[in-house]
Image: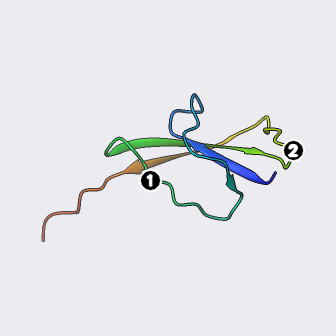
Amino acid sequence: MVEMCFSEDEGFSWPTDWQPIQDSYEYILGGGDGLKSITVKFRDALGNEGTSTGRDDIFLDANAPTGT
């Protein structure tokens, strides 16, 4: 596998372009605070997509803590 792309809707759409596989990737989460599910899929140099995907859940809380 040489490329990867990401989805926030469990793979129903793939809005990111294919990217070279790398150890880390900056992805901007959409839709405000809350639970986010990010799915990744891969393809090889011939353009064949892998049959499995990876997924991770992230809880986004962009509000700064308050209190003393």
The foreground one among 68 and 52 is 52
The color scheme shown is: rainbow
Of marks 1 and 2, the one in the foreground: 2
Q: Amino acid at mark 2?
A: Leu
Work out which residue is located at the far top of the displayed protein and give it: 12
Q: Residue at x 46, y 49 (%)?
A: 58
52 above or below 29?
above
Q: Amino acid at mark 1?
A: Ile
Query: Please, what secondary structure does the residue beneath circle 1 have?
Result: loop
Quadrant of the snapshot with the C terminus? bottom left
The picture quadrant where one finds residue 6 is top right
Residue under label 2: 46
Q: Is residue 66 left or right of residue 43?
A: left
Query: Please, what secondary structure does the residue beneath circle 2 have?
Result: loop
Q: Residue at x 16, y 63 (%)?
A: 66
- Spot occupied by residue 3 in the image (x, y as percentages of width and height): 74, 51
Asked if the residues shown at circle 1 and circle 2 are in contact, with their CB atoms under 8 angstroms apart, the answer is no
